Amino acid sequence: MNSVACDVAIVGAGIVGAACAQECARRGLRTILVERETIGGGATAAGMGHIVVMDDSEAQFALTRYSQQLWQELRPELPEDIEYEPCGTIWVAADEEEMQEVHRKQNFYRQRGVPTEVLDANRLREMEPNLREGMKGGLLVKEDGVLYPPCAARFLTEHARRCGATLRVGCAARRIEQGHVFLEDGENIRAEFVVNAMGASAADLTPGVEIKKRKGHLVITDRYPGFVRHQLVELGYLKSAHSVNSDSAAFNAQPRRTGQILIGSSRQYGAEHKEVDHRMVVRMLQRAQEYMPALGKMSSLRTWTGFRAATSDNLPLIGPWPGDKSVWLATGHEGLGITTSLGTARILVDQMTGAKSQIPVEPYLPSRAGKEHVHA
Amino acid sequence: MNSPAQQKFDVLVIGGGPAGIAAAVGAAECGARVGLVDDSASLGGQIWRTGSATGSPQEASQWIERVRAARVKILCGLRVFDQPEAGILCAEGTEGISELQYDKLILATGARERFLPFPGWTLPNVMGAGGLQALVKSGLPIRGKRVMVAGTGPLLLAVAAHLKKHDAEILMICEQASWSSLAQFGFALSAQPGKILEALRLKKELASVPFVTSSWPIAAGGDQVLESVTISRKGRSETIVCDYLACGFHLVPNTELAALLGCRISEAVQVDKFQRTTVPGVLCAGEPTGIGGLELALIEGQIAGLAAGGREADARRLFPRRARGRKFASALEAAFHLRPELRSLAKPDTLVCRCEDVPYARLQTYTTWRAAKLQTRCGMGPCQGRVCGPATEFLFHWIPDSVRPPIFPTRVESLAAIAHCSEPQEHLVSGGQ
Amino acid sequence: MPSTLGLKVNGVAIEVSPGTTVAVAAMLAGTPCRTSVSGMPRGPLCGMGVCFECRMTINGIKHCRSCQILCQPGMDVRTDE
């Protein structure tokens, strides 16, 4: 049996695995990154690439904000094909209740140093003329942005390689345990740390990890430059993300640098196959047309699905797995994988090397399961 | 929002070219209630396309007359984009969508030209062979224009003859196949009397046109528009000044709808002797089952129509003719096989994906279609890989992604208007962009 | 049936025979159908509505496959968007 040794073996080259590989290699750890198919080809390719701070909980805020700042620091190095756009997010309020939420969020962010601007109906209309009449206003979060995730994942793996990491692409891991990653081709990787960054499939190789698949749909249009200028999210989005049992669709629209409009979003529970579910697409697009009626006449080129990795408390699993000393988790990021990939990598490697993290790591520890669940 | 128009048919035929027309007639003459759908404004597909200057060939008119007489419901200007549940297809028109319900479905979706990249191929006035012919039929003046014809396949001759009839100056026909391949094809033709007559007729019409074999385009030259074509001929290159280059490398079947429905496809849609695919209730006829030309399309269409209409005995009677047609199709494929030199025409900066302007150099490092698509955007444009897919399959041996809806660009409001939706069945399909 | 019909291509009036497609009208008007994403001029390729090289804005609607659309009197065609 072929055998190779390293400090860290990472399984899964989605954006999270790629970020971890880069961080490990950058800090001088001998790193091997294993990917069964395509770099950034799983949920990373399916998602919206929205870099966003969120305020569902302090822990979620801390990780998203930390990570967003890391993306901003990285920005000068990002190549063109990552299409990084600091376009900001506008949380759109359709009624008075949602406008209250705008003010609550603004307050929350102001207290924590995140620059935002409350938009009244007129200002919102100026900024996004294609939203339908009658919107009450919104909250502009200025430092949010968007990027194209598959190229971002590739960039991170290239950086990892330049720092000495080895990439094994097209190679599936069969089993991970006790400091070993057994590959399907018979090779065995021995590592002090084995990182499971397999997203929605994490439990395949680490049985007992509580990850549920949360299926999402997206639609992309042909090029209509200037139609949308910011990432737009309806304030009902959060209500639907909280709902545990029912399928939901909410308005989410992103301008791509190409001028294409990426339309989301949906969440489904218990859906196991990748087929496009027309019921969800219909719901999602009807909702989108309610917010931006002119979308209806636009040419759509593709629809697709992806599986988010969801945990029961909506926070990711970042740290050592109690079931096996050598196994570490970097998974369970639900819809925030792109945003929190960089922060995840930092605090994961901090823990591995005993360095102090810039944010508290306790809320993300896999060992928290079994403790009292914190409902967001 | 308008709700979709609902229509029900015993037999629904997709594609109004010869195979679809023959299938519709076959099924309708069995007494079935038949619908015939086509994207274009009128029936005929590509080969029987009517033009502003030309009428249909007589055979086409006769078939179209039969389709009308058989009371087939003709639905032109409708583009199928999805199957929301078994037994229903969604199609988009200018006013809204239609949901078309069927007991039996016959796919007669035809074929399109294969394009291969070479330097300068994206210049205006470089077109497909069928492409230039279609434009001429749509009003493009060609009288006195200097036309180079290149690529491969019988379509080159048919196009050259048509253009010559409209007073184009055909400078040369460059066929990449070798003389010996064509000679073998000629022998195959001898088994098909009708085809010999056609070949002789073409030969006569093109008597004065230089026809060179083992020859292919190396580059198209010009600044904003085509000015010249450089071809490889007998190991040397030759540059010829011209107005148009009509260049296509034979045909590839349109199998997107068959793939969406889950039919087994290996290069072509697999069918049994009654033209039935591996999906119950779905039949396929004509080019998507294998490029084989007009006569084979008509026979397969008839067989599919009769089989769908329940007249298997009548369908059987056509089997011998189909067998002859299939022999011709095999000879066709062998004769016009693409030579490996065509893989080396593209230079590093030659565009391969025309929708997203992705050059050869960016693509050659990838081993799969999907990885290339995700990283370079190749295939993410409105053609949905219809141009770059066959090209990259030939250049890099990539197998394209599985197909997802919409199988053609479709308005957002149309996707949102689908009324018949049930829980999806596990199937093919990959996730991600 | 009139012998020609009039439409505008990029603001310039032209006359075409009935049965002429918009793609051909653009060619007759001497303009490429579109400019590619890297700024190169493009004309029709497949002639059958699958390649989208002939896409242009017709009566305000973007991305129309002009080779599949017959010229109508008074059409406003733009290839420069």
Image (cartoon, rainbow, N blue to C red):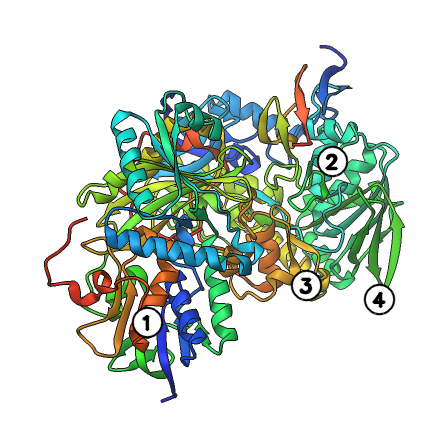
Front-most of B376 and B396?
Answer: B376
Q: Where is residue B344 shown, x and y percent of the image? A: 71, 64
Q: Where is residue A166 shown, x and y percent of the image? A: 46, 77
**Chain under callout 1:** A
Does residue C5 sit above or below B416 in this rendering? above
Label annotation for residue B235: 4
**Chain under callout 2:** C
Q: CA distance from mark 3 to mark 4?
A: 16 Å
| Callouts 3 and 2 in the same chain | no
Q: CA distance from mark 1 to mark 3?
A: 50 Å
**Chain under callout 3:** B
Quadrant in which the N terminus of chain A is drawn = bottom left
* Residue named by callout 3: B343
- Name the residue type under label 2: Pro
Q: Where is residue B136 shown, x and y percent of the image? A: 75, 32
* Residue named by callout 2: C32
Cβ–Cβ under 8 Å for marks 1 and 4: no
Q: Where is residue B55 shown, x and y percent of the image? A: 70, 25
Front-most of B300 and A127?
Answer: A127
Q: CA distance from mark 1 to mark 4?
A: 64 Å
* Residue named by callout 1: A350
- Name the residue type under label 4: Gly
Crowd class of label 2 (few under 14; some 14 to 19; many from 20; radius 10 Å): many
| Foreground label between 1 and 4 | 1
- Give the number of callouts: 4
- Mark 4 falls on what kind of element? loop
